[in-house]
Image (spheres, helix red, strand yellow):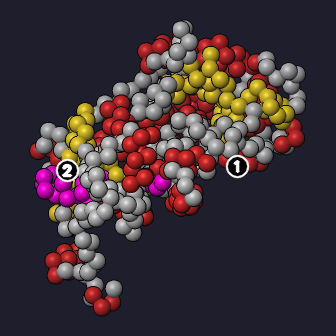
Amino acid sequence: MDINARSVGRVTGKNSTVDDAIRAFTAGELVIIVDDASRENEGDLVVAAEFATAAHLNTMINEGRGLVCVAADGSIIDRLNLPQMVESNSDSHGTAFTVSVDSVATGTGISAADRATTVRAIADPATQPAQLRRPGHIFPLRAVDGGVRVRRGHTEASVDLARLSGLTPAAAICEVLDDEGSAADGAYLRRLARRLDIPLITVAELVAHLDAPDHVEPPVGARLPTRYGTFSAVAHRDSSGTEHLALILGDLATVDAPLVRVHSECLTGDVLGSWRCDCGDQLDLALAEIGAAGVGAVLYVRGHEGRGIGLFEKIKAYALQDTGYDTVEANVLLGHPVDARDYGPAVDMLRMLELGRVRLLSNNPDKLTALERAGIEVELVPLRTPVRTDNRAYLETKTRLLGHGLDGPTGCAPAPEPPTRQFGTTDGDITALESTGHAKRKESA
């Protein structure tokens, strides 16, 4: 089974491939990039920043009609001393706008020629911070480290495409609007690509290209006996180095819509048993329900710590919550989106498992939406976990502001406990280890 197999609808111009887009980028031509259906589902006109001309910018302005920005690697943003536009980014997708700029070599900065000059200046390693006026008519965007395998945005896709083309990791991008001024749909984007005779690719295709055997290690699997049953553990390291895990119980092909849990990594809840959240309880309950069913899968998605802000930032958010802020306010005060998680890796794993219909163990409507927009039929199955004194405010905030279901007991204490975690090694465990040649004496552990 191919972990990179996808059945998502492919939107193309000229029957394009990523290699076509790379050749076009290298030749200084425009490309259209379409992001995931589970995200914006929109298309951008893109050109390598170092090759940007007045003609390119004029086409973007007249055919794209959106805001002209320059997506750039973080090292470029730092070298040019471009601070973020706002301290607290509340954009729904966490788009990292910096202050706007114009090159000092321009006039007013608004003409297509002036904007092309500014775009090239941003990509030019000789440009100094003082050579960019602030504010201006070009809006730089900071790409996240790790590119599209960390964040599946147009910012990261265009920078990754420039990098794959052997160019400076920066690109001018402009969202495409249709004739009515709305975000262009797939049919409109295909027509535009054909009319302009340029390649059109999707972010999913770019990810698949990066995840090809030449770029990353193939997935590996092994037997994993647990107290909930013996699972198959399939690990995958993506091109950003992030490792994800699919825990599979039974033969998924024997069930029309197997139970599936898309679980966001949470060290404090999953491993340390923290009661500040419900993550550990949800993981335990999902494994137990799948174990009872005899068939199902848990997709453990890494890089989701603290709703995507990372462990260090999550602990900072906890400190703010200790002073009275709620979980949403804390993320925003730290300059993060309310929820920065990308469910693309979960969709990839479902494609790997060839699952087109699932019963999703979750209280999170965003997970439901992400899978449905990827073409997967979903039945939502709530997870009823304990509401505790330590996590009640957190759960109520998720319900009130994020639309999560709050299905646990109404009382705060005492709450039912999940199954006791066993940290010893049983005779059965020793037998399993011996069968793989990895048994160790208990006293040497």
Q: Earlier in the sequence, mark 2 or mark 1?
A: 1
> Is residue 319 found left or right of 421 in the rendered image?
right
> Is residue 386 found left or right of 242 in the rendered image?
left
Above or below: residue 273 compared with residue 83: below
For the C terminus, the quadrant is bottom left
In the rendered image, the residue lying farthest to the bottom is 443
Dot 2 and dot 1 residues touching (CB under 8 Å): no
Mark in front: 2 vs 1: 2
Q: Which residue is mark 1?
A: 75
Above or below: residue 373 compared with residue 281: above
The span picked out in magenta is: 282-306
Q: Position of residue 252 (x, y in %)?
A: 17, 47
Q: Is residue 352 visible?
A: no
Q: Identify the mark at residue 296; answer none if there is no mark.
A: 2
**Residue 57 occupies which quadrant of the picture?**
top right
Looking at the image, how many numbered discs can be counted on the residues? 2
Q: Secondary structure at mark 1?
A: helix
Q: Position of residue 234 (x, y in %)?
A: 30, 57
Above or below: residue 265 compared with residue 5: below
Q: Is residue 102 visible?
A: yes
Q: Nearer the viewer, residue 38 or 17?
A: 38
Q: Position of residue 380 (x, y in %)?
A: 25, 39
386 in magenta: no
Separation of residues labelled 2 and 1 (CA atoms): 43 Å
Q: Secondary structure at mark 2?
A: strand
